[in-house]
Image (cartoon, helix red, strand yellow):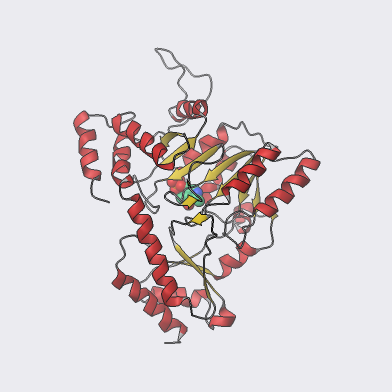
Amino acid sequence: MGGSELEHVRQAFESNYIAPVGPQLDQFEESVAGYVGGQVHCLAVSSGTAALHLALRLLDLTADDEVWVCSMTFAGGVFPVLYEQSQPRFFDISSESWTICPELLEDALKKAAAKNSLPKAIIATDLYGQSCDINRIEGLAQNFGVKLIFDSAESLGARYQDRQCGSGGDFAILSFNGNKMITTGGGGMLVSRDRLAIDRARFLSTQARDLAPHYEHSTYGYNYRMSNIAAAIGLGQLSVLDERVRRRRTIFSRYRNALDNVEGIEFMPEPNWSHCSRWLTAITVDPLKSGKTRDCIRLHLLKHGIESRPLWKPMHLQPLFSGSLYVGRGLDERLFANGLCLPSGSDMSDGEQDEVIQEIRDCLNGE
Ligand SMILES: *Cc1c(COP(=O)(O)O)cnc(C)c1O
């Protein structure tokens, strides 16, 4: 927690607005809209996954529709495609940014357009706090008439040129899960410039109740709304977001300064258009150059009480999606084989980080 959360929660208790509405909820939505900018409207919901589900539901997908997604991501950024009974097609990332590759997308869109089989939507994921190449992907989506959703669950606080992540496309989604840049103890946000779409999503997120004194339903909805109490926590968290981005970038730089000269260790790149939040510091380990595998380092750290994790396992490699369509050259597969996320929490001390660095050095030196 950042410090002011309890005060916002106290105000919520005093007003006796707990759920499903309340002044803190309105204020949280307005504050996030103001933060990401671009004249957007926001709907606060119970998770990032729920926000993505609502965005897809609004697109009226059918079983014949494809949704093109980045393969290297967290499952919550893909499962809603299945909730809507549609077919995901998975795309590789670019080496420049580790986000969905615009060249692969463009090529596939051209081929699909020629066969009159364009996807209904693209979900472009900002990975580990790094923005996608927003302008290029927005341009492609516009040219081919495909809906575009940015999954900015990991990138709140990051920027693309002078635009904040979480505001582009037809929709963007954010997550306030406990492990993200800021948390509401579980929550998410649907963001769009289209006010009517946000109104419709609000209706669906509160059980699709038609206007009537009794309960009247002409379609089905969900119980996805964020509570006023969770939003109060979010208000406090927003005030420390920029500070956390600075801290995580510092943590990244400290790792890089300490390990950059080590043969075989590479850091996640940052293209000149990106100001990455460095949500997690991600590295790759080339065992031929460093003499140690990623898992040697991971297990060495674990033995010393330090948790680290492989990068996301690409979705096209998951048993659930075996046999699904994949467009790429396997860069995501190589990152999964050799990539490691290092401890990156904003509240980690320099001393704790130095310990992690020392253990990595010890492992590489065979100690
Ligand atoms: C965390 C995350 C989600 C899902 O958010 P939840 O709030 O956990 O439901 C979706 N996509 C990505 C890329 C994520 O990291």
Q: Is residue 323 visible?
A: no
Q: Is residue 15 left or right of residue 162?
A: left
Q: Is residue 69 visible?
A: yes
* In the image, residue 293 above or below residue 16: below
The residue shown at (60%, 40%) is 148
Residue 19: name its quadrant. top left
Pick the front one: 136 or 221: 136
x%, y% of residue 346? 34, 60
Pick the front one: 254 or 198: 254
x%, y% of residue 294? 51, 74
Pick the front one: 330 or 240: 240
The quarter in which the C terminus is drawn is: bottom left
The residue shown at (24%, 39%) is 8
x%, y% of residue 6? 22, 44
Residue 300: name its quadrant. bottom left
Residue furthest out toward the top: 213
* In the image, residue 283 above or below residue 80: below
x%, y% of residue 231? 33, 38
Q: Is residue 36 left or right of residue 346?
A: right
Q: How many marks are shown on the rendered structure? A: 0
* In the image, residue 123 above or below residue 264: above
